[in-house]
């Protein structure tokens, strides 16, 4: 079986990395098993990683490959930035050539970015032969719905789901949404969350990050400064065009954070778009960024120096470390709502809705909207909250292993000429509870 996995933008990398690792494990296990029993050798998965280049710089892409031990992409489409239409169209043109040349059995697409939809559309209409053979389209993180079609990601999610052949769902709402939209039950598998697989795998390594020290968030204690404690701080991310492209809305959100930033340092790793808007709208001074960025005492501690600490976007491990130790996270990201749920860190989402309701029902997330007062209120409530979230069903670090097992099983079931013992060997009963 030949699998081609596509990544394009920052939130794709941590979702795809565990799938690649699970494919490697599958192949290693096959090699070990066949050394013992050569007659029972199953089929190795051949894998290719395609990077569309939607995100391209070191901050948004490069550092994630090293942090997540991702191999260099086999193919890089080098698309870069552009309007939705231009970006989607350019990816489609180049990806079609990749599919025709490589002829994979399976295309794995993760998340809800433009790269996801562009490649889903191409794979759904490609034809490898005169009878219209095409790869199976697999969508990882299917079924999430904000029910807000003004979000580009919502359009990407709906369309990708409806042209996919296999839908891997992260939470129960995903099952419900897909069934309500008429998707056939036999395509849907509730496997859990591969982004949480990454978090579980890398959380210990992230503890070794020196980001807290770099940002002056460690206070040295004891007579000789022999021990460190973490200065309470909050973490902020904002990148949605609907939040940062309009000066009034952006300022309303920052207004909601003012009180918090008076009492605590607020670390704000800003997306390139957000940095650009901050400059355009002349918000640098209001953020107190420049004068506070390097303001530390001689021991490297901020010692209660509050305000917003503006930084460039951070790598995966540094950001994971910051999320884990923050007293509060304020964000408009989708994935961060899930990561804070597992870390038990209170989260305030500055959006009107979420496509990830499990993070509110059994996690640490609250939806605050984008108005100054509602954000202030939500922050106050969340600061008083205990640091204990719940663990949503199947968010156990095994999602990618389930995905690979199911893909292998489906492949062998389809090719009826294959020896049946192989499909028995890879079947993992009870690991994929469907609705
Ligand atoms: C994309 C996703 C969004 C995801 C986000 C994470 C879509 C529709 N949106 O939004 O769901 O939450 O990624 O970041 O796919 N830029 C750089 N360097 C880069 C990439 C982008 O400077 O490596 C700048 C460019 O000015 C570009 C802008 O960021 O125009 C936006 O990038 P783009 O890929 O269009 O969308 P994101 O806002 O990042």
Image (tube, helix red, strand yellow):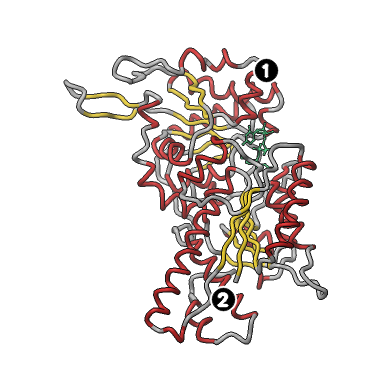
| Residue 86 location (% of width, % of height) | 79, 41
Q: CA distance from mark 2 to mark 1?
A: 54 Å
- Indicate which disc residue 281 carries: 1
Q: Earlier in the sequence, mark 2 or mark 1?
A: 1
Please, what secondary structure does the residue beneath circle 1 have? loop
Q: Quadrant of the C terminus?
A: bottom right
Question: For this rendering, which residue is in front, 2 or 187?
Answer: 2
Q: Check contact, mark 2 vs mark 1: CB within 8 A.
A: no
Side (left or right) of 406 relative to 138: left
Q: Residue placed at 72% from the left, 52% from the top?
A: 117
111 relative to 431, above or below: above
For label 1, the crowd category at 10 Å Cα-Cα, with few meaning under 14, some 14 to 19 and many 20 or more, is some
Along the viewing direction, whichever of 184 and 372 lies nearer the viewer: 184
Q: Residue furthest right?
A: 130
Residue at disc 2, secondary structure: helix
Specify the quadrant of the image occupied by residue 285. top right
- Residue 409, numbered circle: 2
Q: Nearer the viewer, residue 251 or 5?
A: 5
Query: Image point 40% across, 17% down: which residue?
Result: 305
Q: Residues within 10 Å of mark 2 (few under 14, many from 20)?
A: some
Q: Is residue 378 above or below residue 44?
A: above
Residue under the point 30% across and 15% down: 298
Q: Nearer the viewer, residue 149 or 36?
A: 36
Specify the quarter for ligand 1.
top right
Q: Nearer the viewer, mark 2 or mark 1?
A: 2
Question: Residue 161 in the image: x percent, y percent?
Answer: 70, 59
Q: Quadrant of residue 276?
A: top right
In the rendering, at what x and y percent does residue 434 appear? 57, 69
- Position of residue 273 in the picture relative to residue 83 (left or right): left
Residue shown at the point (68%, 39%) measured from the top left: 80
């Amino acid at each position: 079986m030949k699998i081609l996995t596509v990544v394009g933008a920052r939130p794709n990398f941590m979702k795809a990395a565990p799938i690649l690792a699970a494919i490697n494990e599958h192949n290693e296990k096959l090699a070990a098993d066949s050394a013992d029993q050569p007659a029972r050798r199953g089929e190795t998965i051949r894998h290719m990683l395609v990077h569309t280049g939607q995100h391209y710089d070191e901050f948004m892409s490069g550092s994630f490959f090293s942090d997540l031990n991702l191999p260099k992409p086999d193919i890089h489409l080098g698309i870069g930035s552009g309007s939705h239409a231009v970006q989607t169209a350019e990816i489609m043109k180049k990806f079609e050539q990749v599919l025709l040349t490589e002829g994979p059995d399976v295309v794995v697409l993760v998340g809800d970015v433009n790269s996801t939809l562009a490649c889903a559309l191409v794979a759904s209409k490609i034809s490898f032969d005169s009878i219209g053979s095409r790869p199976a389209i697999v969508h990882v993180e299917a079924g999430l719905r904000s029910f807000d079609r003004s979000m580009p990601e919502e359009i990407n999610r709906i369309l990708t789901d409806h042209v996919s052949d296999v839908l891997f769902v992260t939470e129960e709402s995903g099952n419900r949404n897909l069934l309500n939209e008429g998707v056939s039950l036999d395509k849907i598998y509730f496997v859990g969350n591969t982004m949480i697989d990454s978090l579980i795998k890398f959380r210990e390594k992230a503890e070794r990050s020196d980001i807290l020290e770099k940002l002056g968030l460690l206070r040295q204690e004891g007579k000789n400064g022999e021990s460190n404690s973490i200065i309470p701080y909050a973490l902020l991310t904002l990148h949605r065009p609907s939040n940062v492209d309009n000066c009034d809305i952006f300022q309303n959100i920052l207004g909601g954070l003012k009180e918090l930033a008076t009492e605590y340092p607020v670390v704000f790793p800003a997306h390139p778009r957000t940095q650009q808007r901050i400059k355009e709208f002349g918000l640098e001074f209001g953020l107190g960024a420049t004068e506070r960025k390097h303001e530390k005492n001689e021991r490297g501690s901020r010692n209660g120096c509050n305000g917003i600490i503006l930084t460039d976007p951070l790598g995966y491990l540094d950001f994971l470390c910051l999320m884990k130790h923050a007293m509060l996270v304020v964000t408009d990201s989708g994935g961060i709502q899930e990561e804070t749920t597992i870390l038990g860190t209170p989260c305030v989402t500055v959006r009107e809705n979420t496509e990830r309701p499990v993070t509110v029902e059994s996690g640490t997330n609250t939806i605050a909207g984008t108005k100054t007062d509602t954000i202030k209120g939500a922050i106050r409530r969340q600061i008083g909250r205990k640091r204990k979230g719940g663990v949503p069903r199947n968010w156990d670090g095994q999602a990618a292993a389930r995905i690979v097992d199911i893909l292998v099983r489906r492949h062998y079931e389809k090719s009826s000429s294959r020896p049946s013992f192989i499909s028995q060997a890879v079947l993992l009963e009870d690991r994929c509870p469907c609705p």
